[in-house]
């Protein structure tokens, strides 16, 4: 097994590995070291099933089901421990493009870090392509470590020692998708994260942003949102972005502590069957989670 770089800053293709086989602790550690370096690992044409993806995921931490904890899902098409990012109903048919679930999935087209709206947040995510459309549907990743390294000094000074508040429904509400009263009652409380986090595996500093971040504590709401936008525009420049064009059987693993990601436009009349597993980052419970309680006037 070896790793072939795909981008000057990050991302690598895994060569010589069959995910259908169980791995031992030493191999899991080898993957973790590679993730610390590359942040995104591409496993091409693995052809694993749901059970094999879940078994591989279990090597890296406790499972996370993301928004399922805040929004009820009655699908049942895939195992409960997986997150369905497909445009299909429980029988495997394409859902109407104006269906509530499809419109909700459009939130995944915004730059984000999985489960940044909860504590603990997500560590790794693993997305597998079962069927892909004829065009579009790629996933883009932005290296927030390299973005921090290249951040201009004035923005660095403004971002350091700041905290952003993340909320589970904020990303979709920016698209005009307001949560129902039931969803708000059942949702998780907002959480706070530093705008700049130290990655525990590599020791590198990284911006921690995304569509779930709704305000910067200690700043007036408009000023904080402009800061978030400026930082995100910097971090998602082409120089820091890797775009993965999916083929059936591909699985991509990424580190939510080091990168943001987003899905790309595709023909909603065609099948895009994507299945995600995610693991929590228990170490994030030890991070500082407090910032100024009052926004600036």
Image (spheres, rainbow, N blue to C red):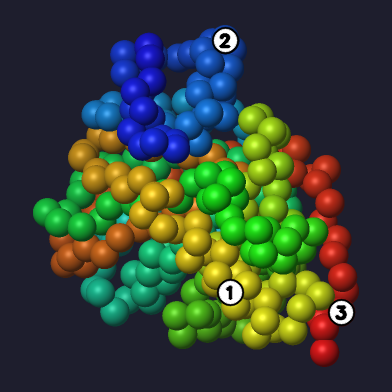
Is residue 77 at all visible to an observer of this figure?
Answer: no
Mark 3 packing: few (<14 Cα in 10 Å), some, or many (20+)? few
> How crowded is the residue under tag 2: few (<14 C-alpha within 10 Å), some, or many (20+)?
few
Q: Secondary structure at mark 2?
A: helix
Q: Quadrant of the N terminus?
A: top left
- SS class, disc 3: loop
Of residue 40 and residue 224, the one placed in the foreground of this image is: 224
From the image, tell me which residue sits under label 2. 26
Image-based side of 182 in relation to 125, left or right: right
* Vertical order, 4 against 267 (above or below): above
Query: Which mark is in front, 1 or 3?
Result: 3
| Sequence-first disc among 1 and 2 | 2
**What is the distance, in whole Å, between disc 1 and disc 2 at their CAs?**
40 Å
Q: Residue at x 58, y 55 (%)?
A: 151
Query: Residue 274, image x and y in percent?
Result: 33, 48
Give the residue number, with chain letter if any, for mark 3. 294
Task: Report which residue position mark 1 lands on.
Answer: 170
Q: How many angstroms separate mark 2 from mark 3 (CA)?
A: 47 Å
Mark positioned earlier in the residue sequence (1 or 3): 1
Q: Residue at x 46, y 85 (%)?
A: 176
Identify whether 203 is placed above or below 295.
above
Residue 103 visible from this viewpoint: yes
Q: Nearer the viewer, residue 143 or 282?
A: 143
Instruction: Assign the C terminus to one quadrant of the image.
Output: bottom right
The reply to whether discs 1 and 3 touch (Cβ–Cβ < 8 Å) is no
Of 48 and 133, which appears nearest the observer? 133
């Amino acid at each position: 097994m070896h790793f072939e770089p795909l981008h000057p800053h990050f991302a690598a293709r895994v060569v010589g590995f069959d995910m259908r086989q169980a791995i031992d602790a030493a191999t899991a550690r080898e993957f973790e070291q590679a993730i610390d370096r590359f942040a995104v690992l591409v496993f091409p044409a693995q052809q694993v099933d749901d059970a094999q993806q879940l078994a591989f995921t279990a090597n890296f931490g406790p499972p996370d089901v993301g928004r399922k904890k805040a929004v009820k899902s009655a699908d049942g098409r895939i195992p409960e421990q997986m997150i369905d990012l497909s445009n299909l109903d429980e029988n495997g048919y394409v859902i109407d493009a104006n269906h509530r679930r499809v419109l909700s999935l459009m939130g995944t087209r915004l730059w984000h870090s999985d489960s940044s709206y909860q504590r603990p947040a997500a560590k790794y995510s693993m997305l597998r392509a079962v069927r892909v459309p004829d065009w579009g549907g790629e996933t883009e990743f932005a290296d927030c470590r390299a973005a921090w390294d290249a951040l201009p000094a004035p923005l660095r000074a403004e971002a350091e020692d700041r905290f952003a508040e993340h909320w589970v429904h904020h990303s979709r509400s920016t698209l005009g998708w307001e949560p129902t009263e039931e969803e708000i009652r059942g949702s998780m409380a907002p959480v706070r994260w530093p705008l700049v986090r130290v990655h525990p595996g590599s020791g590198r500093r990284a911006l921690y942003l995304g569509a779930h971040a709704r305000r910067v504590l200690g700043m007036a709401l408009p000023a904080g949102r402009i800061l978030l936008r400026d930082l995100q525009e910097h971090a998602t420049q082409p120089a820091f972005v890797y775009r993965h064009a999916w083929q059936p059987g591909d699985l991509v693993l990424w580190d939510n502590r080091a990168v943001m990601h987003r899905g790309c436009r595709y023909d909603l009349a065609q099948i895009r069957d994507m299945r995600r597993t995610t693991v929590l980052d228990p170490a994030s419970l030890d991070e500082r989670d407090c910032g100024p309680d009052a926004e600036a006037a």
